[in-house]
Image (tube, rainbow, N blue to C red):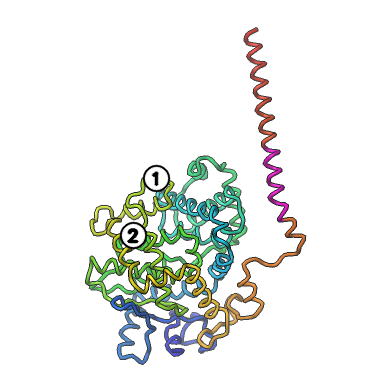
């Protein structure tokens, strides 16, 4: 299988240093493998170069010719995903957190995500804006002990930066202030945007599920069967937004989440369009078992099955996700939310899917965490790393321990300072309340004097 991977290294044109012909096997960066998913029997197998139809499958997914850039771009995103440790760090933090104690903050996170999806919908932004913002928010702030107001303000700051990154839409800070019901002054919003921009230091480009979904749809399309269509994308975005609202969404690699979403989308679409092929191909740098893919898809389907058909309350966490889907598919009876919910109920009842759901989400997160650690951060003959690659990929004990630990160890005096921080914030709040009360009293006395002068 090592030879297979060498053949599937992203190719380039010209004199690029990553050209497959210029580098030996030891010098190549992390490599990708083509997997074939069979929707008839739910099997997921890597394509072997010894199979008789290997060249047919490989040429189909690599899009030889004018569309070869799609294959190269997919590999570029996979390498970006492998070189970042956000997913691993958050999964470790999520597993170590007692979710019952953090239930209030996680419910607040769901409300924030629904609110961000609503801003995205109102301004007709690209579909990946909210997901990109949430991934940055989870990597740096979720489960880190922020107060609700600070968490919402930082979420808005990330959203503004990501919206500028993906769109050319000009939304003024005053409008963002109105979106928050004037809870934040435009000056506060501008300050947090500048602060987060300096904090990120231009490092806010991530591999996103929406990008993988569109690339996989395009790579599997043929002249006779076009898969990258608005209806399929809208259905996939519904599943992605539903997953995005859950706190565990950032625990999974974007390529894995996109694969689970495609499994749901293709199985639903095959009921409407029987011409969709039962063999579809994906690219991974890891080898995920089909049970993990179906388990994640089952959790998403279980949530969709419990959603209200037409949410009327904006407080519902899936209000704007459903609105976005209905904007595209409300005139199609086959794509109604009720039909999607019915399909999801049937999907969850499958024996393999039901078994994975019974194991629990923590089991799925732990399983993917082990796969990431073994594939990216431990020596392996099939995973080669160049010296030019970011140090996060070098499997040294120092880097590995730094990645697995969610928070670095701090001296005792720093812990004491952090324990005093909530007390200081409480004192500040009390003093601010006293100052505000004093100001109100002074204004009231001034008004009484003016009334006495007017009467006199």
Q: Over which residues does the magenta segment extend? A: 418-432
Would residue 299 be visible to someone looking at this image?
yes
Q: Check disc 1 and report its element: helix, strand or loop.
A: loop
* Precedes in sequence: disc 1 or disc 2: 2
Name the one closer to the observer, 153 or 410. Answer: 410
Rendered position, 100 above or below 430: below
Residue 445: image quadrant is top right
Q: Is residue 444 left or right of residue 125?
A: right
Rendered position, 444 above or below 295: above
Q: Position of residue 352 (x, y in %)?
A: 37, 74
The C terminus: image quadrant = top right
Q: Is residue 419 magenta?
A: yes
Q: Residues within 10 Å of mark 1 (few under 14, many from 20)?
A: few
Residue farthest toward the bottom in the current orientation of the protein: 50
- Which residue is pictured at 44% across the width and 85% down the height? 5
Residue farthest toward the top in the current orientation of the protein: 456
Would residue 65 be visible to someone looking at this image?
no
Q: Position of residue 100 (x, y in %)?
A: 55, 58
Residue 209: image quadrant is bottom left
Residue on which disc 1 sits: 313
Which-is-in-front pick, marks 1 and 2? 1
Q: Position of residue 111 (x, y in %)?
A: 48, 51
- Which residue is pictured at 35% across the width and 52% down the height? 308
- Which residue is pictured at 33% across the width and 61% down the height? 235
Name the one closer to the observer, 85 or 22. Answer: 85
Name the one closer to the observer, 95 or 274. Answer: 95
Q: Check disc 2 and report its element: helix, strand or loop.
A: helix
Q: Position of residue 16 (x, y in %)?
A: 49, 80
Main SS of residues in magenta: helix
Residue on which disc 2 sits: 234
């Amino acid at each position: 299988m090592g030879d297979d991977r060498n053949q599937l290294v992203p190719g380039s044109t010209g004199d690029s240093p990553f050209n497959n012909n210029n580098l030996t096997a030891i010098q190549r960066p992390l490599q990708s493998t083509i997997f074939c998913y069979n929707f008839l029997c739910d099997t997921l197998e890597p394509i072997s170069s010894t199979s008789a139809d290997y060249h047919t499958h490989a040429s189909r997914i690599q899009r030889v010719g004018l569309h070869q850039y799609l294959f190269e771009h997919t590999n570029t995103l996979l390498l970006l995903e492998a070189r970042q440790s956000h997913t691993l760090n958050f999964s470790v933090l999520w597993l170590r957190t007692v979710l019952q104690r953090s239930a209030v903050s996680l419910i607040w996170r769901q409300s924030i995500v629904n609110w961000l999806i609503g801003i995205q919908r109102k301004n007709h932004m690209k579909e990946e804006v909210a997901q990109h913002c949430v991934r940055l928010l989870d990597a740096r702030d979720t489960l880190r002990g922020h107060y609700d107001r600070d968490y919402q303000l930082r979420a808005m700051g990330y959203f503004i930066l990501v919206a500028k990154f993906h769109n050319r839409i000009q939304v003024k800070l005053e409008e963002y202030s109105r979106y928050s019901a004037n809870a934040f002054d435009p000056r506060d919003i501008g300050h947090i945007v500048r602060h987060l921009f300096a904090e990120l230091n231009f490092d806010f480009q991530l591999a996103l599920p929406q990008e993988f979904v569109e690339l996989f749809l395009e790579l599997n399309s043929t002249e006779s069967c076009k898969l990258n269509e608005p209806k399929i994308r809208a259905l996939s975005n519904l599943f992605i937004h539903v997953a995005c609202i859950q706190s565990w969404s950032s625990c999974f690699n974007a390529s894995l989440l996109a694969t689970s979403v495609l499994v749901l989308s293709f199985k639903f679409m095959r009921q409407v369009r029987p011409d969709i092929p039962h063999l579809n191909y994906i690219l991974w740098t890891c080898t995920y078992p089909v049970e993990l893919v179906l388990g994640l898809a089952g959790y998403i389907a279980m949530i969709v099955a419990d959603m209200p058909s037409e949410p009327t309350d904006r407080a519902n966490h899936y209000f704007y996700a459903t609105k976005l889907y209905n904007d595209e598919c409300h005139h199609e009876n086959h794509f109604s939310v009720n039909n999607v919910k019915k399909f999801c109920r049937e999907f969850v009842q499958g024996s393999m899917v039901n078994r994975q759901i019974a194991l629990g989400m923590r089991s799925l997160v732990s399983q993917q965490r082990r796969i990431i650690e073994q594939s990216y951060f431990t020596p392996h003959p099939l995973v080669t790393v160049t010296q030019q690659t970011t140090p996060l990929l070098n499997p040294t004990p120092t880097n590995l321990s730094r990645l697995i630990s969610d928070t670095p160890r701090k001296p005792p005096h720093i812990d004491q300072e952090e324990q005093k921080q909530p007390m200081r914030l409480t004192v500040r709040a009390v003093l601010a309340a006293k100052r505000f009360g004093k100001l109100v009293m002074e204004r009231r006395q001034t008004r009484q004097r003016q009334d006495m002068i007017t009467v006199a």
